[in-house]
Image (cartoon, rainbow, N blue to C red):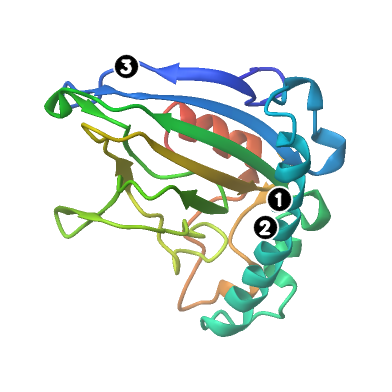
Amino acid sequence: MDAASGRIEGYGTKLQRDLDGKKTWNDFFFHVVAPPAMVDHGVWPASPAGYRAANEEYCGHMMRWTRALFEHLSLGLGLGLDKGAMAEAFGGDELVFLQKINFYPPCPQLELTLGVAPHTDMSTLTVLVPNEVQGLQVFRDGHWYDAKYVPDALVIFSNGKYKAVLHRTTVNKDKTRMSWPVFVEPPRELVVGPHPQLVTDESPAKYKAKKYKDYQYCKINKLPM
C-alpha cells in the first residue's frame, strides 16, 4: 500500500502469524478496475494475452450488478430509502472497484496454516467469485462455518442495521484454491457516516462521520473508529 495515495496495487504475499500462531498461506495480486481515472494498466499482468479484455468485460457486468444490488438494498431491506440513495451516498460514479486475485497452493501441513486470518472487510461491498475448492468460512455464535458466497455488510451507513461478517479462508492439502474478490469502496475523500434518514430520536447515530481514508487508516492500524 502506498501511504501517500492510499493505493493498494501489485503482487504480494502474507507470511505473518495470526493469534493462534498459524501462518497465512497465499499469494495475491491487487489492481483497481474502476473508475477509469484511477485505472493503471501498467500494473496489470501482461499475460495471458486476453487478461485485460476478459477482465474488463467481467468487471463491466459486475459493476452493473453492483448498482442493481445497491438499489435492492435501498428499497427491499427495510431502510426506506430511494433506490439510488445508497449508491450515491457511497460515491456514485466515483465508487472505487479494487480487484484482488488470491492464489492458495496446496499445503502439506494444514494445522500450521490459514489462507487468510480472521477479519472483516473495510469495503462497502465485497463481490466474491471462488473456484470449486472450498475455503471460505464465516464466524457465528462461537463457531466457524463453511460458506460459498458471503456479500460483506454495510455497517456505518446503515447505522448498525447491517453487520460486517467475520470471515477467514482455509487451505487444501491436495488442491489449489483461487478466489477473485472485488472490493467496492467509497472515494478516499468522501465523508462516510450514518445516512440522515436512518438517524432518529429512537435510533441515534452510532458512528462518527469521517472521511473514508481516515476510516481505512483506523481499520488497517486497528485503531478505534
Q: Nearer the viewer, mark 3 or mark 2?
A: 2
Name which of mark 3 and mark 1 comes first in the sequence: 3
Residue 38 horizontal side relative to residue 193, left or right: right
Question: Residue 215 at x, y = what percent?
Answer: 56, 39
The amino acid type, in three-letter code, at marker 2 is: Met
- Report x, y in % for residue 31: 67, 31
Residue located farthest toward the front when viewing the structure as drawn? 49
Q: Earlier in the sequence, mark 3 or mark 2?
A: 3
Q: Nearer the viewer, mark 3 or mark 1?
A: 1
Instruction: Decide if residue 28 is in sight here.
Output: yes
User: Residue 79 appears at what percent x and percent y?
Assistant: 56, 79
The residue shown at (24%, 33%) is 174
Between 188 and 201, which is closer to the camera in this rendering? 188
Secondary structure of the residue carrying numbered label 3: loop
Q: What residue does disc 2 label? A: 62
State the residue at coordinates (70%, 17%): 4
Tell me the crowding category of disc 1: few under 14, some 14 to 19, or many 20 or more residues within 10 angstroms, Cα based. some
Q: Look at mark 1 in the image and give the residue it sits on.
A: 59
Number of the label disc, if any, that sits on residue 202: none
Whether 13 is drawn above or below 122: the answer is: above
Residue at the outermost right position: 37
Label 2's element? helix
Q: Position of residue 66 (x, y in %)?
A: 66, 62
Q: Disc 3 marks which residue?
A: 16
Q: Is residue 195 above or below residue 22?
A: below
27, 209: nearer the viewer: 27
Structural crowding at the residue carrying mark 2, measured as other residues with C-alpha within 10 Å and reported as few (<14), some (14–19) or many (≥20): some
